[in-house]
Amino acid sequence: MTAPAFGGVDVSLDTRIDHLDWPRIESDLDARGNALVEGLIEPERCAELAALYADDSRFRSRVVMARHGYGRGEYRYFCYPLPKTVATLRSAFYPHLAPIANRWNAAMEISTQYPLAHEDYLARCHAAGQIRPTPLLLQYGVDDYNCLHQDLYGEHVFPLQVAILLSEPQRDFDGGEFVLTEQRPRMQSRPEVVPLRQGDGVIFAVHHRPVQGARGVYRVNLRHGVSRVRRGRRHTLGVIFHDAG
């Protein structure tokens, strides 16, 4: 098995993302704050990405969740230059998500608007001192889990992100479901479990999203996490579009 190339763009993956059912994805994001993308990455590429976890040269830092009260398990942030697959996911998804993010902000009366090219948005982040890459690999073993949280990292936050499951449920691990919660004003939190198979991705809101109510649009806060892994080992790729300070 060869290691993924670094730098540049994977044209086949870029094309695949361009040809996703974007009207359906946008509709799902508007309705639920998340959208499932099945079969985004093939199993061989999933295995290559998961295998990178052991290569110290690919990462800028490692976080052991229990030390910080984040849960159990660990994750590693990639360093620049990103693996070719990861860089392509960032650059190919972003121009489809930026118009959705701009529409959401306008609905919530948030003045921030996002450029349509990811490199232009990263330039904005870097000018503000957010220069550290945020795509990450997460690794969970038995009894590991990830507490509900939001990936914010600084002043500049792109409001959508993507998580891709690199392991196969019931083969590589049991449990470890991807969980989202929504907190609506004066209501109890609403949980949702997103059923993922190996290579599936889920696009979801980082922080909040607009919801149309009887008296106009209001903001709903979202958090995400992973339930307890009961058996085996689980790897996930997280694709975050803003960099960290």
Image (cartoon, rainbow, N blue to C red):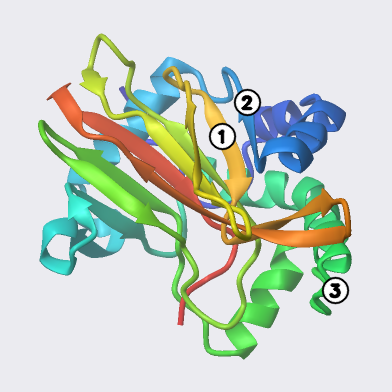
Q: Secondary structure at mark 1?
A: strand
- Tell us which disc is closer to us: 3 or 2: 3
Q: Residue at x 11, y 65 (%)?
A: 67
| Residue 23 figure quarter | top right
Foreground residue, 189 or 180?
Answer: 189
Q: Which residue is mark 2?
A: 37
Return the x and y of residue 176 as percentages of the image width and height: 28, 29
- Tell us which disc is closer to us: 1 or 3: 3
Decide if residue 75 is in sight here.
yes
Residue type pointed to by label 1: Val
Residue type pointed to by label 3: Glu
Q: Which residue is mark 1?
A: 202
Which of the two labelled residues, at mark 1 and mark 3, occupies the earlier sequence position? 3
Contact, CB < 8 Å: mark 2 with mark 1? yes
Q: Which residue is mark 3?
A: 109
Contact, CB < 8 Å: mark 3 with mark 2? no
Return the x and y of residue 216 as percentages of the image width and height: 89, 59
Return the x and y of residue 79 as percentages of the image width and height: 38, 64
Residue type pointed to by label 2: Val
Return the x and y of residue 77 as percentages of the image width and height: 34, 60
Decide if residue 6 is in sight here.
no
User: Separation of disc 3 and disc 2 at Cα?
Assistant: 29 Å
